[in-house]
Structure formats: C-alpha cells, structure tokens
Image (cartoon, helix red, strand yellow):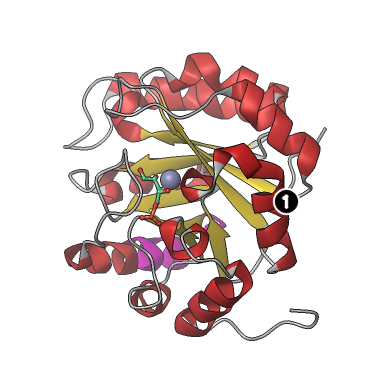
Amino acid sequence: MPARGIPTGTQIVPSLLAADFVRLGREIRAVEDAGAEILHLDVMDGHFVPNITFGPPLVRSVRGATRLFLDTHLMIRDPLALMEPFARAGADLLTLHVEALGGGAASGPSAEGLEVFRRARELASDELGCLLGLSFRPVTDPLPWLRELGASCDLALIMTVEPGFGGQAFRAELLPRIAEVRRLIDERGWTCRVEVDGGVNADTAGSCARAGADLLVAGTAVFDRPDRTAAMRELETAAGVAPRPGR
Ligand code: DX5
Ligand code: ZN
C-alpha cells in the first residue's frame, strides 16, 4: 500500500504525551474537533531517553480510534528493529533519531549511520508503506546529515528541547537552525518537511513558523488547556495559519 502523504500547509500537531492516558479516545476526539490533521506520538524506551511512554499496542489502539495522520517520533535506542511493529500498528510516519543510527552523530553521518538509514528507507518504502523522518537532538547539527540524506527524507524534526519530557522551555538559540534547514531544503528543491518539537506555545510558535517550520508539535500547550479548540486556534493564530473553513 502506498504511504499516505503528510497533510499539507503549516500544521499545529498535538502531541499525545501531554494527554490524559485514561481518556485517550476523548482526548483524540477533542483535537480532531479542533481541526488537527496530524497527531504526534512520542515513543520513549528508557534507554535513548530517560523516560518510558508506550509501544505498538497503544499505537494500534490509537489507529483504531482515529483517521488522523500518525506522526511517530521514535526516541528509542534501536529504531530499525522496531520500525516494523510500529508501522504494522498503523503509524503513517516513523521518525528516527540520527543519534540512534550508530557510529556517532555529532560530526555528521558515519558509514554505519548511512547504512542503517539506507536499510530504514528501503524498509519504509518497499515493505511497510510508511514515510520516514530524521530527528536531531539540540546537540546535533542537522546540516551534515541532511546534505547527504535530505533528498530521501520525508521529514526533518528539529528538537528545540532535550528529548524525553514534555513541558520544557523552548530553546530560542535553536531558531537559526530551523531557518538553515529550511534554506537547504528549498535550495535543493526537496519535498522534505520541517517539524519543530519542544516548548512550542503561543509565545514561540510565531518565530518557529517564520523560521520556516511546517509542522509545530505542541503537547502541553494543547492538552494542559481545558479548551483544546481555543488552544489550537491560539497556536494557529500565533503561527500565522490562515483560518480554514469548518474550524
Ligand atoms: C519531548 C517530545 C515532545 C513533547 C513536547 O521529548 O518529543 O513531542 O511532547 O511537549 P511540549 O509541547 O510540552 O514541549
Ligand atoms: Zn516528540
């Protein structure tokens, strides 16, 4: 089955990490009703990051409850080994951290990292029918990676906090990075989308969108608010998203 494309335009992407897990069905409906088209799923394994969230069974339940595009952020030590169960559970996009590909990451891709990516790309396209993204911790410069691999990436996820926990403060010193990644992708004419994750709220969403982010992940800024529709509208206004009919 061909992969489903990432919804177009600038998007506010609620992260389920900040939702009430006892009421997941209702939480998902609330953001659907608020007009979200994408749901961000934060998978943490207690090794790559010092926190644990959920695995394929929960993704499968979420898939059964919604048609939203499932943007799955794999903060796990061995992403290649777990791509298949997450894709089979219904993830539309799997985003792997370059720091988990092996061979070190800070100075750019090693031969090992490139080989693991090549296998991940083949698996995603040829067997799993899902999209593939790459994510970068604040300490990792995405440019050397994207110069090599940007043409074959569906998404570049720029972390603006250290991955592992919701509710952290946005690191504004990383804004130029978003703009650099945007410029590289536009110059080369690649289709890769740019996502920002961590500390996005009504105060920071505008600068992320202006720097060139397409997808703005928001966990606590959506789910810590009793009125999720109001929260989504505020974030969209801050990000300069034109009001859409029916919202
Ligand atoms: C953090 C996760 C984020 C998290 C963002 O490691 O990758 O997706 O849910 O949460 P907020 O929006 O609260 O910073
Ligand atoms: Zn995330």
Residue situated in front as seen by the camera: 117 or 241: 241
Percent position (x, y) of residue 234? 51, 80
Q: Is residue 246 left or right of 103 when viewed as pictured? A: right
Image quadrant of ligand 2? top left
On whether residue 182 falls in the magenta region, the answer is yes
For the residue pair 173 and 121, the one nearer the viewer reads as 173
Q: Position of residue 103 (x, y in %)?
A: 24, 20
Locate residue 207 relative to residue 188 in the image: left or right: left
Q: Residue at x 66, y 35 (%)?
A: 91
Q: Position of residue 34 (x, y in %)?
A: 68, 69
Instruction: Give left or right: position of 247 versus 51.
Output: right
Q: Quadrant of the N terminus?
A: top right
Left or right: 65 as drawn, with respect to 171 = right
Q: Does residue 9 lie above or below 242 as drawn?
A: above
Q: Is mark 1 within 8 Å of ligand 2?
A: no
The answer to whether residue 125 is visible is no
As shown in the figure, which amino acid type bears the numbered disc 1? Leu
Relative to residue 234, is residue 28 depicted above or below? above
* Coordinates of residue 129 in the picture (x, y in percent): 72, 31
Q: Residue at x 45, y 57 (%)?
A: 195
Confirm whether residue 229 shows in the render.
yes
Of 246 and 88, the residue lying toward us: 246
Locate the C terminus and report the quarter of the image it occupies: bottom right
Q: Which residue is mark 1?
A: 68
Which is more toward the observer, 163 or 108?
163
Q: Which segment is the magenta one?
A: 181-192
- Residue at 36% x, 48% y is 166
Q: Quadrant of residue 178?
A: bottom left
Label 1: which secondary element: loop
Q: Is residue 222 magenta?
A: no
Give the main secondary structure, helix, strand or loop, of the magenta stretch.
helix
In terms of image quadrants, where is residue 33?
A: bottom right
